[in-house]
Image: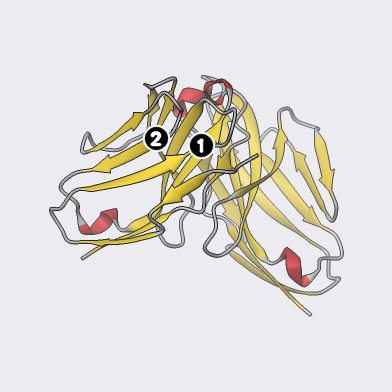
Amino acid sequence: ETGVTQSPTHLIKTRGQQVTLRCSSQSGHNTVSWYQQALGQGPQFIFQYYREEENGRGNFPPRFSGLQFPNYSSELNVNALELDDSALYLCASSQNRGLDEKLFFGSGTQLSVL
Amino acid sequence: EDQVTQSPEALRLQEGESSSLNCSYTVSGLRGLFWYRQDPGKGPEFLFTLYSAGEEKEKERLKATLTKKESFLHITAPKPEDSATYLCAVQASGGGADGLTFGKGTHLIIQP
């Protein structure tokens, strides 16, 4: 059984650029959630995808968007990067649209915006 | 708005010195309260889910309890490998689509 894998592990971008982060969910999981974790903070919910549809969204602007593919892998896209977007981006997979929120997290992508 | 407050922010203990971490929450109907452990450079790792006041769960040296307003994570005779940040999170009864609301965590250091 493979766990949740994220790529890349680290990324440096400049303000105004666009970035795409990738996530492969754990085998058998059909739901993917994305979280943003700033330094010294707890993770903040960005959105969740279930069977390729956005199933819920936190308090993040539309420049944060996502996709889920038929194999349940997922992408997080961020446009017009801002300095405050610097954070650890975590992907988590689960079953049943997150009704059982035993989330399995990847190790994250550390994004630095300069 | 759902809120989770964890205390203390940081805690340093000697090996074998038991203690408790606190998680206070306000939520519009609690579906579940979750404890996760996060090691540096890693994603959070699931520990427990608690659903109703009075519920308790144990795993090795850890025991989680729940009341209507707070949860405690008790650590008994901790070892250096228990050093980590412990995160508390809540899910509202609206279901999974709103995600989890996390606290900032308690950074726990166990000294040999």
Q: Is mark 2 on a helix, strand or loop?
A: strand
Question: Do the dots labelled 1 and 2 sit on one chain?
Answer: yes
**Residue topped by disc 2:** A74
Residue A23, position as x, y percentages in the image? 43, 42
**In the displayed image of the protein, which residue is found farthest to the bottom?**
B112
Residue at 87% in and 65% down:
B77
Chain under numbered label 2: A
Please determine whether, in this image, residue A89 is positioned above or below residue B95: below
What quarter of the picture does the C terminus of chain B occupy? bottom right
Residue B109, position as x, y percentages in the image? 68, 71
Kindly indicate whether the residue at mark 2 contacts the one at mark 1 (C-beta within 8 angstroms): yes
Residue at 52% in and 63% down:
B41
Please determine whether, in this image, residue B112 is positioned above or below residue A53: below
Q: Is residue A57 left or right of residue B87?
A: left
Residue at 71% in and 28% down:
B51
Q: Is disc 1 surrounded by few (<14), some (14 to 19) or many (20+) residues within 10 Å?
A: many
At label 2, the amino acid type is Ser
Please determine whether, in this image, residue A88 is positioned above or below residue B40: above
Q: Is mark 1 on a helix, strand or loop?
A: loop
| Image quadrant assignment for residue A10 | bottom left
Residue toward you, B35 or A64: A64
Please determine whether, in this image, residue B15 is positioned above or below residue B9: below
Residue toward you, B47 or B67: B47
At label 1, the amino acid type is Ser
What quarter of the picture does the N terminus of chain B occupy? top left
**Residue topped by disc 1:** A25
Chain under numbered label 1: A
Q: Is residue B36 left or right of residue B110?
A: left
Q: Compare marks 1 and 2 and give the one earlier in the sequence.
A: 1
